[in-house]
């Protein structure tokens, strides 16, 4: 069914946008029933999502499909939160699980984090959370329950991809592979990719992200419980904004910062955001996309550069993207060494498999001009950062 036809079928449901508080209360009730948990005692978390739904409801250009997609995503996120809380209440010993020396991979979007994440996630002693695990976080699963969770996640992301060829081409969802750990962060700029929400963006500037990262830690403890200990490898461009919060919640975390010239990133990122917006809103404005996401990405770099001076020098490993592209076997091996991990023949074979995969080396560059931007605009927004990228090299 086409997106246009779906919007026509779902149009009567859009009336719910006029009553976001009632809709949110129903959403929480359904989440409680589905998760077997309770929302009582988690009012601060729920207030944040209630406010977010109110902002979506006030968006005049949200389509019927977009409104339903927003409700579905918030439903899953609330449901997963309550599921994690229920598991921890039933087994409080899980909170004593040690999340030891996790690695947070950060960098601008579209910056080869998939390559390093996927190689490490296949390496002995390392692990990344799978997409379905971040959607349905649970422990002590029977094989039947695990298959059902995987099946539900596969159906969810396939249905999203079917709605738009452009969305499918710019998003590489696979429920049984590692993915962006923003799926386990309650708040962040990922919500801004669905609609233009200036009030929510202002709210994010004042939001304390330490509880969000504590929730990420609790989810990892649930996923780790009853299994051999592994070193977690966690990827998201959004981590750039929160380096200090990460180190407060995970004091022995290492930040792997993959650096890439933003001129080669921003157009591709804008096209990805445009594809997501096109599923949720009517006629997204490319120039507004360009202005918004150039500002957001430049602010991320500024935030991270300011934060790093507050962290121990050894907490951050800088990796130049050009080296990963030009010398992947050298660059990844050196990254293993910097992280104190052993580089083996199995790891070399893993890297070869990742390099041969369909997601590596895929061209996805778009003209900046479509988004009202020029090379000069990007360089001005990022200051001396592009020049510093070219001076980096692992030895």
Image (spheres, grey):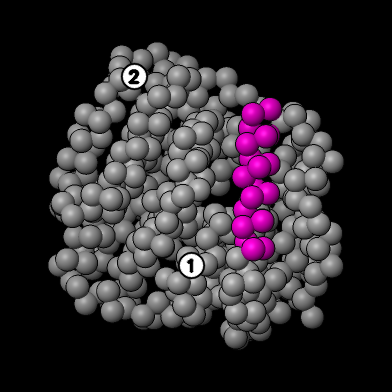
Residue 26, given in percent of the width and then of the height, sits at: 20, 34
Quarter assignment of residue 25:
top left
Disc 2 designates what residue? 14
Is residue 35 visible in this depiction of the protein? no
Classified by dominant secondary structure, the portion drawn in magenta counts as helix
* Residue at screen point 25% across, 74% down: 94
The foreground one among 339 and 57 is 57
- Along the polypeptide, which appears first: circle 1 or circle 2? 2
Q: Nearer the viewer, residue 296 or 116?
A: 296
| Nearer to the camera, 179 or 248 | 248
**What residue would you read off at disc 1?**
246
* Residue nearer the viewer, 66 or 247: 247
Q: Which residue is painted at 45% across and 38% down in the image?
A: 200
Q: Label 1 to label 2, Cα distance in Å?
A: 38 Å
Residue 296: image location, x then y, percent: 62, 45
Q: Secondary structure at mark 1?
A: helix
Residue 193: percent from left, percent from top: 53, 38
Secondary structure category for the residue under label 2:
helix
Tell me what residue is drawn at x 48 percent, y 67 percent.
Answer: 246
Percent across and percent down for residue 14 are: 34, 19
Residue sitting at x 36%, y 60%: 211
Q: Is residue 33 left or right of residue 126?
A: left
């Amino acid at each position: 069914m086409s997106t246009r036809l779906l919007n026509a079928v779902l149009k009567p449901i859009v009336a719910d946008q006029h009553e976001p508080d009632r809709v949110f209360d129903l959403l929480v009730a359904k989440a409680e029933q589905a998760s077997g948990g309770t929302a009582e005692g988690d009012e601060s978390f729920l207030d944040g999502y209630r406010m977010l739904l109110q902002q979506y409801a006030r968006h005049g250009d949200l389509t019927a499909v977009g409104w339903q997609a927003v409700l579905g995503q918030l439903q899953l996120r609330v449901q997963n939160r309550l599921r994690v809380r229920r598991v921890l209440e039933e087994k409080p010993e899980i909170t004593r699980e040690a999340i030891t020396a996790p690695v947070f991979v950060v960098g601008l979007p579209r910056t080869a984090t998939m390559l390093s994440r996927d190689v490490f996630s296949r390496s002995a002693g390392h692990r990344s959370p799978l997409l379905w695990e971040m959607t349905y976080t649970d422990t002590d699963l029977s094989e039947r329950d695990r298959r059902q969770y995987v099946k539900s996640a596969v159906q969810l992301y396939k249905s999203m991809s079917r709605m738009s060829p452009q969305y499918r081409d710019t998003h590489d969802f696979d429920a049984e592979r590692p993915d962006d750990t923003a799926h386990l962060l309650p708040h962040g700029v990922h919500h801004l990719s669905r609609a233009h929400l200036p009030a929510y963006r202002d709210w994010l500037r004042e939001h304390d992200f330490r509880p969000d990262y504590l929730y990420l830690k609790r989810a990892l403890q649930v996923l780790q419980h009853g299994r051999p200990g592994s070193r977690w490898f966690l990827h998201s461009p959004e981590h750039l904004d929160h380096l200090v919060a990460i180190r407060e919640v995970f004091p022995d975390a290492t930040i792997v910062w993959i650096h890439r010239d933003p001129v080669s990133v921003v157009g591709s990122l804008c096209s990805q955001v445009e594809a997501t917006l096109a599923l949720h809103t009517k006629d997204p404005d490319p120039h507004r996309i360009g202005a918004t996401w150039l500002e957001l990405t430049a602010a991320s770099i500024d935030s991270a550069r300011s934060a790093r001076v507050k962290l121990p020098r050894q907490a951050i490993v800088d990796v130049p993207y050009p080296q990963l592209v030009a010398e992947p076997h050298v660059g990844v091996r050196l990254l293993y060494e910097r992280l104190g991990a052993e580089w083996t023949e199995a790891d070399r074979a893993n890297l070869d498999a990742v390099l041969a995969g369909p997601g590596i080396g895929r061209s996805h560059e778009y003209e900046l001009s479509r988004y009202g931007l020029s090379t000069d605009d990007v360089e001005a927004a990022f200051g001396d950062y592009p020049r510093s990228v070219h001076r980096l090299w692992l030895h």
